[in-house]
Image (cartoon, rainbow, N blue to C red):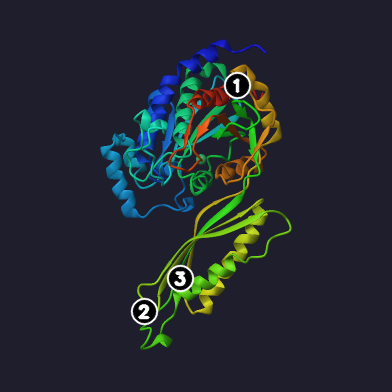
Amino acid sequence: MRLNEWFLKETQALAPQLSAFRRDFHTNAETGWLEMRTASKIARHLTELGYTVLVGREVCREEDRMGVPPEEVLREHAEWAKTHGADPEFLDQVKDGFTGVIGIVHGAQDGPVYGMRFDIDALGVTESCEKSHFPAREDFSSVNPGCMHACGHDGHAAIGLGVAEILMRHRDQWNGTVKLIFQPAEEGVRGAKSIVGAGHLDDVEILLGSHVAAMPEDEICDLIPGAGGSLATTKLDAVFHGQAAHAGGSPESGKNAMLAMATAILNLQAIPRHSGGATRINVGRAEAGTGRNVIPDYARLELEIRGETSELNDYMEAYARRIVKAAAEMHDCTLDLQVMGAAGSLESSPELMQAIQKVAPACGLKVSKELRAVSHGSEDFAYMMNCVQAHGGQASFMQLTVPTAGPAHSPTFDFDERALVNGVRAFAGFLLFGGAR
Ligand SMILES: [Zn+2]
């Protein structure tokens, strides 16, 4: 196969800049809906490159945002972003928790509409300061306490900016329209729905996303063209409101929210399994009560449900909703049930995986033997993929395989920065060398 020499050289030359972007985002890690500094920097860079840039409320539909932090947290973090180098003009547009950015560019002639998605949020993890941890050793650890890029989205954001650079520079060499979608709040599967809800995926015919991933045990490769088998999931918060009363003097006049909660917990874990496939349920956090001699008037649960398919997840969710509702009623409490995050299962389109497999070697990428990685978590890129596939388009979730350190979502997670150049090659190479044409 003839290698596209100029492309390999140009993408390799981007390496120092990509790593600088990645390290800057890593240092200034921001969690979901608070990616104010990150989003403002991305918007500024895309504007300078000449993209048509959508920011803030244009990108995320307000009603479809899930798990947005309380107002005072948003306000406080906007101050943090301001003193940590956020772009003032764009900060103003994203500061209310509308932290998505889309860059649009047209190629030489009319053609398909491509969507390329890059998630940008960090996690509520305190980063390791051990010198064995690469970011600590190289002095780009997070300066935002309790907040860390422990899943590689700092790299994803950097890859998006690299792709932006190459596609703009060579816009005379490809046809169609590209939307570069920088998505907030992937963690907790909270952000993608709001971008789909705003209609940005409605005209997308070919959709690509990626994630950095640990190298498979039995093979050295740079890219797995697709993924499937991720679990559909729903994250719920259930708040029970009762009536406080003196536990000795008049317990009968109380309404015990803690009892309602406890009844709910035991029954949630006891939902019968489904013959149609794997399901999961977990109540991960519970709080209730104010003191030993007071009938608890308040209780709160954080739970999540998962299913091998969206239908299995729906079965679990309907059952769980019935249980918390009935448990509240049993003890004469009221219930406030909120969806904090949700995603369907995802499955890469076979034709698109094959097209990626075909074009990637000429872009300097060694493709895995298996076309499709099996995912065991949940990923809200599913919202976008399902939307595109539902109207007849093709979508794939590529895996950028590199050596990694520490488990994902842990204080010592890190990935080999080779993933950055590889990521740019995978996205930009697909467009330039005609994977889908
Ligand atoms: Zn991730």
Using residue 252 as the reference point, say whether residue 71 is left or right of it: left
For the N terminus, which image quadrant?
Answer: top right
- Crowd rating for badge 1 (residues with CA inside 10 Å; few <14, some 14–19, many 20+): many
Residue 397 drawn above or below residue 318: above
Instruction: Identify the residue at image location x=35%, y=47%.
Output: 96
Name the residue carrying label 2.
Answer: 294
**Of helix, strand and loop, which one carries label 2?**
loop
Split into 4 quadrants, where in the image is the C terminus? top right
Q: Are marks 1 and 3 in contact (CB under 8 Å)?
A: no
Q: How crowded is mark 2: few (under 14 residues within 10 Å), some or many (20 or more)?
A: some
Name the residue tied to disc 3: 240
Q: Disc 1 marks which residue?
A: 365
Q: Is residue 275 above or below residue 61?
A: below
- In this rendering, the label closer to the viewer, 2 or 3: 2
Q: What residue type is labelled 1?
A: Leu
Q: Is mark 3 on a helix, strand or loop?
A: strand
Mark with earlier residue (2, 1): 2
